[in-house]
Amino acid sequence: MKSLLGIGNALTDILAVLPDDSLLKKYNLPLGSMQHVDAKTGNTIWADLKEIGVQYVAGGSAANTVSAAAILGMPSGYIGKVGDDELGSLFRQSQLQNGIKSNLLVGTEASGRAMVFITAPNADRTFATYLGAALQLEPCDLDPAYFAGYDYLHIEGYLVQNQNLVRRAVEMGKERGMIISLDMASYNVVESNNVFLQDIVKNYIDIVFANETEAAAFTHRPPREALQAMAEMADIAVVKIGKDGSMIQRGDEFHFIDPWPGDAVDATGAGDTYAAGFLFAHANGMPLKTCGEVGSALAAKVVEVIGTKIDIPRWKAAKQEIRRLMGISE
């Protein structure tokens, strides 16, 4: 079985379902955006969310993808940096439980955390992120031994706050003949790093994932045209359009993937788990359409729960559906 290595911001998601958008306005957080905050602001927001009620889940985009792929049975590893604290221990333990070969380094700052505001009626997610120790991951931390034996390298778009780190990671992956995938970050992150991302996607990325707002920020085009533009840069382009499904293109080959049925309560991690399903199917030699269907089927399960942790009954149902899609017998 081919294997997957992820690299990203090792964050713990602190999730809260908001009764209204008053907290978003209080902290000047645009709906659906991802904003970086300093330690002081992060602690203040955390205290406000505790009054509403929070859930703690080991997260970070690439970590979510790697975790879901590992649960599907794909040998997986991860590179990140945490603090020497309770949230860092929670993150490390979560990866061990999921069978991930975890290369978690320890920084001098507190562990990173993403405060996730979930708002009705569409389970929209807005992030206030304190990166902390995650931001201390540097190019010199990328030991070649961490990459040994892996077939795929998956990078989260949020890492572009350290462009030298991303460039070194993709260079190391390319040197080893790895298939490199990139999942775009929030549209505002894409906008502020567009020139760099254009260069990386054109020269290093084999599979690029983006949702419709990220694709628009990246190409300045509507979803279908954005997909075409992205497919001219990378071997495979995927644009996820939420409840309307997804689109995939490789050269002249195009597929529209219908959304899988699901009762959405929280879209956190939907794109991450879609990428996990897609990469798992791709690693098993499945056609592009099947890769998209597997991604969609898995994403439909995570939106039914608060946070990114799919429960056991849903995992069981997802695996049965994925086996059917891939033509694998019980």
Image (cartoon, rainbow, N blue to C red):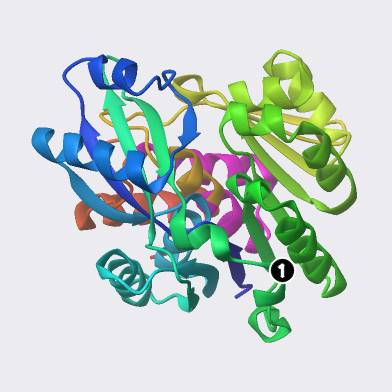
Amino acid beneath label 1: Pro
Percent of width and height locating residue 43: 28, 45
Q: Quadrant of the C terminus?
A: bottom left
Q: Is 8 on the left-hand or right-hand side of 165? A: left
Q: Residue furthest bottom?
A: 145
Q: Nearer the viewer, residue 111 or 176?
A: 111
Query: How many marks do you count on the picture?
Result: 1
Percent of width and height locating residue 63: 47, 59
User: Which residue is depicted at the point 56% across and 64% down?
Assistant: 136
Q: Is 141 on the left-hand or right-hand side of 98? A: right
Percent of width and height locating residue 299: 42, 40
Residue 3 is a magenta residue:
no
Mark 1 nearby-residue class (10 Å; few <14, some 14–19, many ≥20): some
Q: Quadrant of the N terminus?
A: bottom right
Q: Which residue is mark 1?
A: 139
Q: Is 147 on the left-hand or right-hand side of 251? A: left
User: Which residue is depicted at the point 71% across and 61% down?
Assistant: 165
User: Which residue is depicted at the point 68% across and 60% down?
Assistant: 285
Write down the quadrant of residue 31 in the picture.
top left
Write down the quadrant of residue 110 in the picture.
bottom left
Is 206 drawn above or below residue 140 in the view shown? above
Res 328 visible: no
Please tell me whether the stretch drawn in magenta is mainly helix, strand or loop: helix
SS class of the residue under badge 1?
helix
Is 176 drawn above or below residue 55 in the view shown? below
Magenta highlight range: 276-300
Res 62 visible: yes
